[in-house]
Amino acid sequence: MDILILAVVALPLLTALFLKVASKFLNELLTNFITINAALLSVGVSFLMFGYLFLDKFKPIKFELFEWYPSPQIIFEFYLDGLSGVMMVLISGLSLVIQLFSTSYMSKDEKYTKYFEYFNFFVFSMLLLVLSGNFLVMFFGWELVGLSSYLLISFWYEKNSAAKAGNKAFILNRIGDFGFLIGLMMILNYFETFNFVDIFDSVLIKQPSNLDLIILFLLLGAFGKSAQFPLFSWLPDAMEGPTPASALIHAATMVTAGVFMLVRVSPMLQFSELASLTIIGFGLLTALIAAFAAINQDDIKKVLAYSTISQLGFMFIAIGAGAYVAAIFHLVTHAFFKALLFLGAGAVIHEMHHEQNIHKMGGLRKKMPITAAMMGIGTLAISGIPPLAGFWSKDEILASVFSKGGIYYGFWALSLLAAFMTAFYMGRHWLLIFVKEPKNNLESIHEAPKNMTRPLILLGIFTIFIGFINTPFFHGLEKVLEETLHHVEVTHLPKGLTLAVLAVLSIGAGFTGLALAYLIYIFDIISYFKLKIPFINEIKNLSKNVIFINDVGNIVFVKGLKSVSRRVAVTVDAMTIDGIVNGISKYFLKSSKQLSYTQTGLVRNYVVYFGLFTLILVLIFLISPEVLA
């Protein structure tokens, strides 16, 4: 049974390799047959393994493939427990749904087969990461996820913007990965192993003196992969890739890697108060900045991109507060409603002939009723409206933060503000696309093909019901993760009236945000009452330009580093290094020319030279005989 773990990882890899080798002989129909059936088989094996875990009460399963290095012993191994089991089912299941959608969305594309080749390689990379049994195998998956995301983001590299977006994602992730790699080297130096179980058992006995530093370096890697401030600017630009690929990246793969890794290392993280406060602080900052930025975005996909960044911030808030179950719970629910929203956006873009400006849409609920309804469900879910999935997970995060008390009351209040902003900008997003009267003629627009609407309906159903896997009345996910977090101190929900009041406030924030969006963008309350809001244009400009973080980063880190590197090239490289090397070479060139004059070709001259040097040697011997002794 253990070897089936290898099958889960290998199936998407073998699919990608086969599509690569046989691409010249495959048309769309054959490509669909191969990739969809391989994905179905992968999902089947994933659910079989998860069922086996369930029957065995989620006791971990290990599978050793081969010994990588003898001393210290490093084994290429896989590890399946409740945490990796949830991620395995989520990744394989959502990738199947998104591939079904892709068969219609990517139809007629010149690089149709190549798209599915990259797609399956991405799925393999993520499965390798989450099923890894030690830090080294995780690092391989970590880097391959970065590579495969680069391939998908820059898929249409003929467009300069797509090529730049791919490069930006790759480079910013390398910054985070550099920190992650340093953390791994520190772990190997102290523990003399990469194995998760051995390291976590050792930490429970005695924490290393540099534990804070190790966690902070690992955290830098998580900031890159999960797009946290200040390394989040690559994610909105990643929208240049195909929309289904964006759904995969945002829903259950790359951007969740950092969250998964931090929950995996929770046995270490629980002992670092500094790291926990850093995580919750940066998570809160990210959630607020991204939510503020999303309010005035015009691109249908960029609103969702900043939404993803903000929701990832909520997951980091949960981890920082020690609510690891809540973090994974929100990861799961977010995967479904964000995949639903992105694929819905893809359906709209497809029918709008690749128009992405939401101000050029409007009234589409009459033309695309199924897409409108499904995206409406996704919008309500992310806004935290009960009983949809987003309500249960986001409310659990907010309540868990509140239950910590002290300074965490402030964190809770700011998190509630971010939740209100989420409902506001997502309400704006849906209303401008589907309700507001259109400015253009949309007679040619109609509902998306069935291969697009069926995955939307399936995701819509999951978005309604998936939240019930972990509620105050049924702790299903908590039971799944119980063995994983057995030795970890986990923050739990408050009880009784406190929990009820917090839930009411959370629901109130969601409804208030949606209602305000309706009043401003549909009822047009500002014009109706002729309201004058001070500094409104400046605030809009700040929001649309993401508080000019990208511009500052471009000036300081791009243009600034280019300027510094040019000066270094001139002063250090050209003038100093090249100057020394060229000066030495010129000296030897001149001296060799002078010596060359002694080579006359006349025997009498050589006899004179021989006699002269013999005389010198005789004189040296007479003066200091010990020199020649």
Image (cartoon, grey):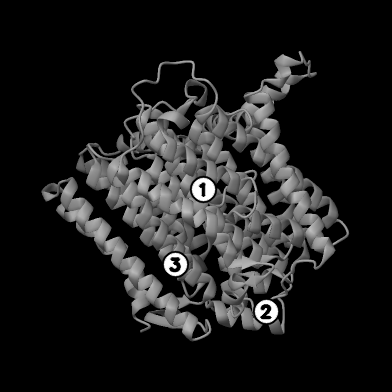
Vertical position of residue 237 compared to residue 523: above or below: below
* SS at badge 1: helix
Q: Quadrant of residue 429?
A: top right
Under mark 3, the amino acid is Met
Q: Is 118 on the left-hand or right-hand side of 303? A: left
Q: CA distance from mark 3 to mark 2?
A: 27 Å
Q: Position of residue 416 (x, y in %)?
A: 75, 47
Under mark 1, the amino acid is Lys
Q: Which residue is mark 3?
A: 88
CB under 8 Å between discs 3 and 2: no
* SS at badge 2: helix
Q: Is 186 on the left-hand or right-hand side of 66? A: right
Name the one closer to the observer, 462 or 156: 462
Specify the label residue 338 is tagged with: 1
Q: Earlier in the sequence, mark 3 or mark 1?
A: 3
Q: CA distance from mark 3 to mark 1?
A: 18 Å
Q: Residues within 10 Å of mark 1 (few under 14, many from 20)?
A: many
Q: Is 319 on the left-hand or right-hand side of 334? A: right
Specify the label residue 203 is tagged with: 2
Q: Which residue is pictured at 59% across the width and 72% down the height? A: 476
Q: Residues within 10 Å of mark 3 (few under 14, many from 20)?
A: many
Under mark 2, the amino acid is Val
Vertical position of residue 490 compared to residue 54: above or below: above
